[in-house]
Image (cartoon, grey):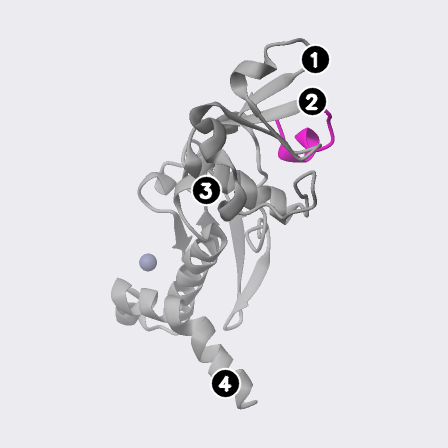
């Protein structure tokens, strides 16, 4: 069930069995600009998970928290956290995006490791012959466990783009140096910030 649908409905509760799940949910609800019934913001400081722990259920529509056991009565729907589709967004909506790498057009493509075995070992890869950068979005499990998932994803895409720049420059050896490529992918935003501050970007 999609979170965007859950938040529209009264009496639909999301059951978070772990504190991690609750915190992840707080983040998502805050992103949707929802609040607790009393107007406080959702965040990990006031997730109130301690109250019912593994029995904690949140109703995003009304900003309430209830004990799993108290929701037995008719009229309530309980959705397990793992079944909530958060529709991970952010900068990652890059499917079919075309980019110009030193005069060569590359296409960014989203795929899954179920479909595409090349994504089992790697989160993303680039194909010089087909001029593609293929990436996989994180699953809910990873979203739950990796902090700053958006930043994590952005870096993965940057990493592949750096590969293509080396490749299209004819600098294959540098492009094969994963440490170098990853260093550039990590530091690039910081370098850009310095350039921008000095207006020399
Ligand atoms: Zn690489």
Which element carries disc 4, helix, strand or loop? helix
Q: Nearer the viewer, mark 3 or mark 4?
A: 3
The N terminus appears in which quarter of the rendering?
A: top right
Mark 4 — residue? 195
Residue 186 position within the rendered picture, expressed as x and y whole percent measured from the top left: 38, 67
Query: Is 97 placed left or right of 183 in the picture?
Result: right
In magenta segment, residue 188: no
Q: Which numbered tag is attached to residue 11?
A: 2
* Residue at the disc numbered 1: 75
Q: CA distance from mark 2 to mark 4?
A: 51 Å
How far apart marks 3 and 4 lie (CA) works out to: 32 Å
The reply to whether residue 78 is in sight is yes
Extent of the magenta region: 1-11
In this view, the mark in front (1 or 3): 1
Residue found at x 57% / y 89%: 199
**Residue 2 shown in magenta:** yes
Residue 189: where, in percent of width, then height?
46, 72
Whether 58 is drawn above or below 24: the answer is above
């Amino acid at each position: 069930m999609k979170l965007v649908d859950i938040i529209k409905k009264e009496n639909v509760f999301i059951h978070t069995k772990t504190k991690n799940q609750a915190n992840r949910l707080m983040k998502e609800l805050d992103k949707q600009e929802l609040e607790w019934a009393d107007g406080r913001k959702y965040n990990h400081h006031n997730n109130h998970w301690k109250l019912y722990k593994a029995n904690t259920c949140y109703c995003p529509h009304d900003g309430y928290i209830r004990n799993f056991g108290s929701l037995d009565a008719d009229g309530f729907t309980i959705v397990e956290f793992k079944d909530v589709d958060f529709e991970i967004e952010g900068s990652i909506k890059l499917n079919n995006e075309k980019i110009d790498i030193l005069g060569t057009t590359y296409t960014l493509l989203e795929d899954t490791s179920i479909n595409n075995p090349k994504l089992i070992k790697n989160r993303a890869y680039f194909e010089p012959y087909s001029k593609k950068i293929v990436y996989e979005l994180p699953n809910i499990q990873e979203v739950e466990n990796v902090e700053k998932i958006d930043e994590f994803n952005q870096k993965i895409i940057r990493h592949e783009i750096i590969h293509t720049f080396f490749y299209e420059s004819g600098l294959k050896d540098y492009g094969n140096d994963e440490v170098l490529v990853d260093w550039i992918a990590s530091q690039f935003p910081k370098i850009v910030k310095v350039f921008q501050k000095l207006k020399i970007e």
